Image (cartoon, rainbow, N blue to C red):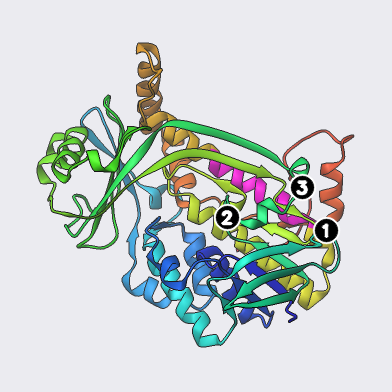
Amino acid sequence: MRTQVVIIGAGPSGLLLGQLLDRQGIDAVIVEHRSEAHVLSRIRAGVLEDGMTSLLKEAGVGQRLMDEGMVHGGFAIAHHDQLRRVDVAHYTQGRHVTVYGQTEVTRDLMEARRASGALSLYEASEVRLHDIDSDAPSVTLVHQGETLHIECDYIAGCDGAHGVSRRSIPQDRLSLFEKVYPFGWLGLMSDTPPVHEELIYARHADGFALCSMRSSTRSRYYVQVNADEKVEDWSDDRFWSTLSHRLPAEVGEALVTGPSIEKSIAPLRSQVTEPMQYGRLFLVGDAAHIVPPTGAKGLNLAASDVSVLYRILVQVYHHGRKDLVPSYSPTCLDRVWKAVRFSWWMTNTLHSFPEDDGFAQRMKDIELSYMLDSVAGLASIAENYVGLPYGELLSSEVVNKFSSPNYPQEPLTAKKVCSGS
């Protein structure tokens, strides 16, 4: 079998890349080791930056998002028993975020791919990547008992931190940067109306809390818990009591409780892999970077990777611009590290750490107070929350120049050759 691009992973990033390429007449086969039902059952993020909503519209899957998504022009931070609203739209010239669950994004993309007739191989086993540092990479796998060999030009690794894509790169060619946080988030979903019209990020001496939503009738709440906590030790009553305690009194009193329909604990860590490409293999999304959910950057970062790779491949296939291929990693990493910084700042400022002493607590309090009382601080929070602009592609000459060991390491502000979204 021969195709132009093999996409490893049928999560939202792999499906989105496949859909965008298909609309440009670029052939891509998606390979996924899980079943379609399993992929669709994952409950993850639900806050989309405006860059991602624009990309979904460009992919032709934005109608239900526009019809059902909840547009938010701001969010609230609970501090000292008060709600402080960050007016995102005001500080970003009208930009906003949209609440629309990752499950729904995945569903829309699956339906679009099915309608296009493009090939997706679910429940694939023994997936192997070959000759990724050559001009003729390929992928082998077993699907429905048959061994397949797929020749291609490029491979997009959209299969997460533990997938075969990152493992296929020689470990001595990668640098891993990681911070593991000493706590997790206990999340509960319930068919109850949200306690507030916008998201609430709550800083409390006993730990962080987040009030989010999936719709006007379905809520998603989180509380910070110790890293060794077990879900079975948390009854619904205990969760609701803890959440209410960490919110301002007027918000806690308005909280509508009900039986959980899903409950889980997620560990928190920041992780970035450099570089994000090796030969003809590109790492996309969680395969290259993971951020804490504070600030809702994970899915959105994956979308910005997709945007960069998609535009490179369009330039390669439609205009012969193979010189742009090396720009993928530096273009993505410039934005990735900025988003990692924002998630790190939100996590450090809003959470309680076991090692925090009185001085550390005071510093976090005054840091948050300063940012919320400053026009510049509010503008910084707003522009990061709504999403920094997508990176613009750099020519190979610029990439080579900035990667030279003899060149001073400065921000990539060189000539731009291809505009992003």
Q: Residue furthest left?
A: 253
- In percent of width and height, residue 266 lies at 39, 44
Image position of 218 (left or right of 420): left
Q: Could you tell me the amino acid type at mark 2?
A: Gly
Q: Which residue is mark 2?
A: 285
Asked whether the viewer can see residue 420, the reply is no
In this view, the mark in front (2 or 1): 1
Q: Which residue is mark 1?
A: 133
Q: Could you tell me the amino acid type at mark 1?
A: Asp
The disc, 2 or 1, on the residue closer to the chain's N-terminal end is 1
Residue drawn at the location 24% of the way across and 27% of the way down: 80
| Position of the C terminus by quadrant | bottom right
Closest to the observer: 51 or 211? Answer: 211
Asked whether the viewer can see residue 160, the reply is yes
Q: Which residue is mark 3?
A: 170
Closest to the observer: 357 or 178? Answer: 178
State how far apart marks 3 and 2 are (Cα). Answer: 19 Å
| Position of the N terminus by quadrant | bottom right
The magenta region covers 326-340
Q: Where is 225 relative to 167, above or below?
A: above
